[in-house]
Image: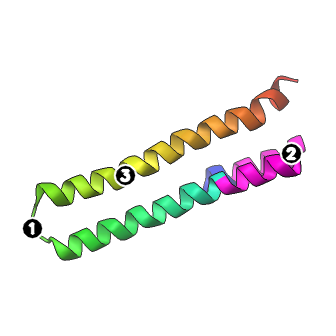
């Protein structure tokens, strides 16, 4: 969450265009949504399968992997949005 706030502050300072703002906001929302889905899935799996089960672990790992992919993608978006402005 702090990274999202920092990105918004950087966007204000660097003067993002409306299109760049849209991309930034959608990226932040995507990561937060996936974090919420990951947490929900983990809680549901824990409720449905209190014992250790490799399928439960796999479900949790896949959900965590999706969050990781979104986080890596958000870094790429940040570089694309802020890189050229910072290099100027």
- Quick one: label 3, few (<14), some, or many (20+) residues within 10 Å? some
Note whether 73 is above or below 44 in the view shown.
above
* Residue 77 shown left or right of residue 55 in the figure: right
What residue sits right under mark 3 in the picture? 64
Which residue is located at x 64 percent, y 51 percent?
Answer: 27
- Quick one: label 1, few (<14), some, or many (20+) residues within 10 Å? few
* Secondary structure at numbered mark 2: loop
In the image, which residues are magenta?
5-26
- Spatial CA span between label 1 and label 3: 20 Å
- Quick one: label 2, few (<14), some, or many (20+) residues within 10 Å? some
Residue 56 in percent (x, y) is at 19, 60
The numbered mark, 1 or 3, whose residue comes first in the sequence reads 1
Q: Quadrant of residue 29?
A: bottom right
The numbered mark, 1 or 2, whose residue comes first in the sequence reads 2
- Spatial CA span between label 1 and label 2: 49 Å
What residue sits right under mark 2 in the picture? 16
What residue sits right under mark 1 in the picture? 51
Which residue is located at x 88 percent, y 46 percent?
Answer: 17
* Residue 28 shown left or right of residue 72 in the figure: right
């Amino acid at each position: 969450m702090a990274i999202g706030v920092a990105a918004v502050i950087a966007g204000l300072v660097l003067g993002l265009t409306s299109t760049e703002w849209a991309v930034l906001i959608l990226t932040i929302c995507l990561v937060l949504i996936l974090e919420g889905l990951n947490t929900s899935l983990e809680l549901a799996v824990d409720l449905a399968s209190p014992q250790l089960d490799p399928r439960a672990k796999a479900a949790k790992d896949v959900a965590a992997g999706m969050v990781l992919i979104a986080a890596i993608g958000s870094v790429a978006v940040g570089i694309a949005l802020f890189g050229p402005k910072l290099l100027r």
